[in-house]
Image (spheres, helix red, strand yellow):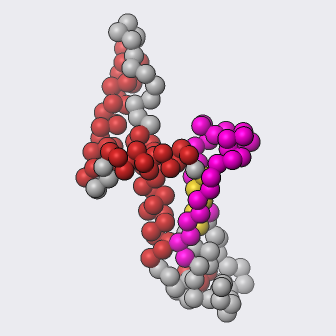
Amino acid sequence: DVTTGCRNWILTIEDTRAHPPGSESSNTLPEVFLSGALHGNERVGPTTVVEVAHLLLESAACEALPRGLPPSPDADVEVKSNWESDLAAAESCRNKLAQRGITELHRRWLARLVTTRRIVIVPTANALGYFQNRREEAGVDPN
């Protein structure tokens, strides 16, 4: 419906553990803005920036494994089992990224971006135009 429009999604990726909201480090994080498309008939950009978001998050999650330090030799069975599960998940995740051409260097670089930046992604600023595959929104060019 031209009168009600569509929702515009905004994704924000940031490491809130390293930079808690309201902290000085959070307030001074460099920001990166990724726009998928301004016009509704620009079809590739929105999918591309959503895939970029997925790759950034996947790399950061993969790089965060295993969590913590290796258990001590006298740790209980559950702690050791959790560590082994994390190691297996890390290996699986890293192998999947490698199969897609993401090297260790690139995976670490992508994860570092997530840890050291606030990344704001707008897949399409003209959601209604995208839905209608029209450059304009309600007859207005968003430029």
Pick the residue in front: 9 or 31. 31
Tell me if 130 is positioned left or right of 57 in this view: right
Q: Locate residue 62: give its quadrant.
A: top left
Q: Is residue 28 above or below residue 89?
A: below
Tell me if 100 is positioned left or right of 116 in this view: left
Q: Is residue 70 above or below residue 97?
A: above
Q: Locate residue 3: give its quadrant.
A: bottom right
Name the outermost residue toward the left. Answer: 99
Residue 131 visible in the displayed image = no
Pick the residue in front: 25 or 82. 25
Quadrant placement of the C terminus? bottom right
Q: Residue 134: where, in percent of width, then height? A: 56, 89
Quadrant placement of the N terminus? bottom right
Q: Residue 65: where, in percent of width, then height? A: 41, 34
Pick the residue in front: 22 or 51. 22
| Residue 44 shown in magenta | no
Tell me if 43 is positioned left or right of 7 in this view: left
Residue at (71%, 79%) from the top-left corner?
Answer: 4
Q: Residue 30: where, in percent of width, then height? A: 62, 52
Residue 142 visible in the displayed image = yes
Q: Is residue 133 above or below residue 29?
A: below
Name the outermost residue toward the bottom. Answer: 139
Residue at (28%, 56%) from the top-left corner?
Answer: 100
| Residue 11 shown in magenta | yes
Q: What is the magenta range? A: 10-37
Residue at (54%, 44%) from the top-left corner?
Answer: 115
Name the outermost residue toward the top. Answer: 74
Q: Residue 84: where, in percent of width, then height? A: 33, 25
